[in-house]
Amino acid sequence: SSFPQDVIDQIKEIFKDMDTDNSGSLSVEEFCIALKQTNLSVSNDDLIKRVKEADTDNSGTIDFKEFLAQLEKSVNK
């Protein structure tokens, strides 16, 4: 990861808060709820696209590694 460890630790806490069922990964629903809570204006199509981009193993959920990789992509644009 290109993020410093203290930032990764903070991201991990945010991820845990988003993971409302404590499964260790984010369902599409959890991911969408979390994105909408950021008050970013994100369309449903954009949400679906972001979930598909993040879910690199096509499991239907987003684990922390995938979440972190998606964040890095967003930051490095």
Image (cartoon, rainbow, N blue to C red):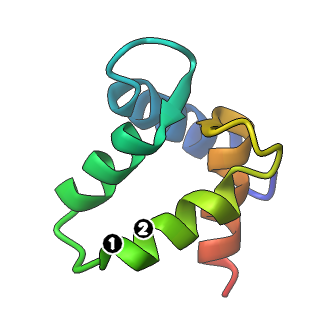
73 or 45: nearer the viewer: 45
Q: Nearer the viewer, residue 4 or 75?
A: 75
Q: In the rendered structure, are the residues bearing label 2 and label 1 in contact, judged by CB atoms less than 8 Å apart?
A: yes
Residue drawn at x 34%, y 52% is 32
Residue 25: image quadrant is top right
Residue at coordinates 24% horizontally, 74% vertically from top-left? 40
Q: Amino acid at mark 1?
A: Asn
Viewer-side residue, 2 vs 50: 50
Q: How many marks?
A: 2
Q: Is residue 17 left or right of residue 1?
A: left
Instruction: Give the side of residue 59 with respect to residue 57, left or right.
Output: left
Q: Looking at the rendered structure, which numbered label has been put on residue 3?
A: none
**What SS does tag 1 mark?**
helix
Residue at the disc numbered 1: 44
| Dot 2 amino acid type | Leu
User: Counting other residues with Cα less than 10 Å from the Cα at mark 2, is it few (<14), some (14-19), or many (20 or more)?
Assistant: some
x and y, in percent, of residue 42 in the image: 30, 77
User: Where residue 74 sits in the image (x, y, percent)?
Assistant: 60, 74
Q: Position of residue 37 (x, y in %)?
A: 19, 54
Q: Is 76 on the left-hand or right-hand side of 33?
A: right
| Mark 2 vs mark 1, CA separation in Å | 5 Å
Q: Quadrant of the C terminus?
A: bottom right
The residue where tag 2 is placed is: 47
- Compared to residue 22, the image places residue 48 above or below, namely below
Residue extending farthest top:
22
Name the residue at 73% across, 55% down. 69
Crowdedness near tag 1: few (<14), some (14–19) or many (≥20) residues, C-alpha within 10 Å: few
Q: Looking at the image, is 2 positioned above or below residue 43?
A: above
Q: Position of residue 64 (x, y in %)?
A: 65, 34
* Element under disc 2: helix
Residue, x 37% and y 14% (percent of image)?
21
